[in-house]
Image (tube, rainbow, N blue to C red):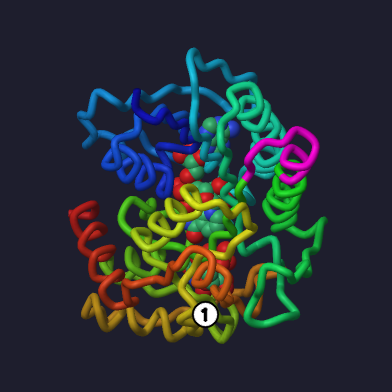
């Protein structure tokens, strides 16, 4: 019998790429989503009979007939604009949704993988960020709804590991990009690409001297699959350590799209982290994983996707 896997958030950017990869490895995949920030069309290309899509809010009780080998919990708004608009839903999916999916993992004796985030480090005082750093998070700031939900989710996952013996793995994902991000989801890369392709000004927040490190989606999915199959549980950082300022990112995207759009400076959102770069030493040594796709190649593929979407 083939391996049977549940992916929550399957219609989202990362969830849909994970579904593709798991199907290509022969898994039977159940995708679950309530489409709050995801899009059904991200899964339209799949004709594999081993895939089923279930519309369900994972903060409500989840019922799945038959065995499950793996549960990958990826449901959650992820763009700062989304979680500012959906603060309660974000807190609920990180807390209640994590509880429900962990309960299911316990009942089915399934291996569980939680999509955590570099946001657990908040506005970091340690740079680059290693897994043993506890973070600097404002619980009552606008980003607190996401950061604290994910920190709670990690704590809940580790409690199920310790007290119920569930095989719980945690990946801390750093800024990841690629095809199937929503054009207007507000994150820097889709924002700048769609602005360049529509001859609109590039909205750089603050002075643009804050830094991020961007990972292409195929590299991330490979890292997650390696963690899933390893004996390690994490938390493990997965991301690309190539750090740059947001202004450098904007100018690279302008060059690659051959755009003449001007830069328009906007207010820096509250609690926007000043720096972010993963220390990936653990993923390199435990999982033998390193990112392989450079920024220009990853951006070229993403720009081609957005061109097609905007055509
Ligand atoms: P996304 O918004 O594209 O996908 C999230 C999906 O979860 C959507 O399809 C949405 O409809 C679904 N969802 C939300 N609440 C739900 C609920 N209650 N029940 C069922 N489905 C629900 O975002 P993404 O970028 O693909 O992120 C996926 C996961 O990875 C999230 O958990 C996010 O926190 C994590 N992550 C992403 C990044 C990144 O750079 N993309 C970085 C760190 C962490
Ligand atoms: N950013 C920006 N202009 C935009 C969108 C984002 O300057 O239109 C900045 C944002 O302030 C942050 C960085 O780009 O410093 C990355 O933002 P994103 O929303 O992609 O993810 P974050 O890392 O903040 O979760």
Magenta: main secondary structure: helix
Position of residue 204 relative to residue 270, above or below, is below
| Rendering quarter of residue 172 | bottom right
- Determine which residue is flagged by label 1: 265
Residue 28, percent from left and from top? 35, 28
In the image, what residue occupies the spot 59% across and 20% down? 62
Residue range (magenta) = 158-168
Position of residue 192 relative to residue 154, above or below, is below
Q: Is residue 301 left or right of residue 147?
A: left
In the image, what residue occupies the spot 52% across and 71% down? 285
Q: Is residue 36 visible?
A: no
Position of residue 153 relative to residue 250, above or below, is above
In the image, what residue occupies the spot 59% across and 61% down? 236
Residue 165, percent from left and from top? 72, 36
Nearer to the camera, 228 or 208:
228
Q: Is residue 34 left or right of residue 97?
A: left
Q: How many marks?
A: 1
């Amino acid at each position: 019998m083939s391996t049977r896997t549940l992916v929550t958030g399957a219609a989202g950017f990362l969830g849909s790429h994970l579904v593709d990869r798991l199907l290509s490895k022969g898994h039977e995949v159940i995708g679950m989503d309530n489409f709050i920030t995801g899009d059904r069309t991200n899964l339209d290309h799949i004709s594999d009979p081993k895939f089923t899509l279930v519309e369900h809010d994972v903060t409500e009780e989840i019922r799945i007939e038959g065995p499950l080998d793996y549960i990958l919990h990826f449901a959650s708004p992820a763009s700062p604009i989304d979680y500012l608009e959906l603060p309660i839903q974000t807190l609920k999916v990180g807390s209640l949704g994590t509880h429900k999916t962990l309960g299911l993992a316990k009942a089915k004796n399934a291996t569980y993988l939680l999509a955590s985030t570099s946001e657990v480090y908040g506005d970091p005082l340690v740079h680059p960020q290693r897994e043993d750093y506890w973070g600097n998070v404002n619980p009552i700031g606008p980003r607190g709804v996401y950061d604290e939900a994910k920190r709670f989710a990690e704590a809940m996952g580790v409690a199920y590991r310790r007290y119920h013996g569930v095989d719980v793995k945690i990946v801390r994902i750093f800024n990841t990009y690629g095809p199937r991000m929503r054009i207007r989801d507000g994150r820097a890369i889709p924002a700048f690409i769609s602005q360049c392709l529509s001859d609109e000004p590039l909205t750089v927040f603050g002075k643009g001297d804050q830094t991020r490190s961007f990972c292409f989606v195929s590299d991330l999915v490979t890292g997650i699959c390696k963690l899933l199959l390893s004996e390690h549980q994490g938390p493990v950082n997965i991301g690309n350590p190539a750090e740059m300022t947001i202004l450098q990112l904007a100018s690279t995207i302008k060059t690659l799209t051959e755009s003449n759009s001007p830069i328009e400076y906007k207010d820096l959102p509250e609690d926007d982290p000043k720096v972010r770069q993963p220390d990936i030493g653990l993923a390199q040594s435990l999982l033998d994983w390193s990112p392989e796709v450079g920024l220009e190649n990853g951006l070229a593929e993403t720009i081609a996707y957005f061109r097609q979407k905007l055509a």
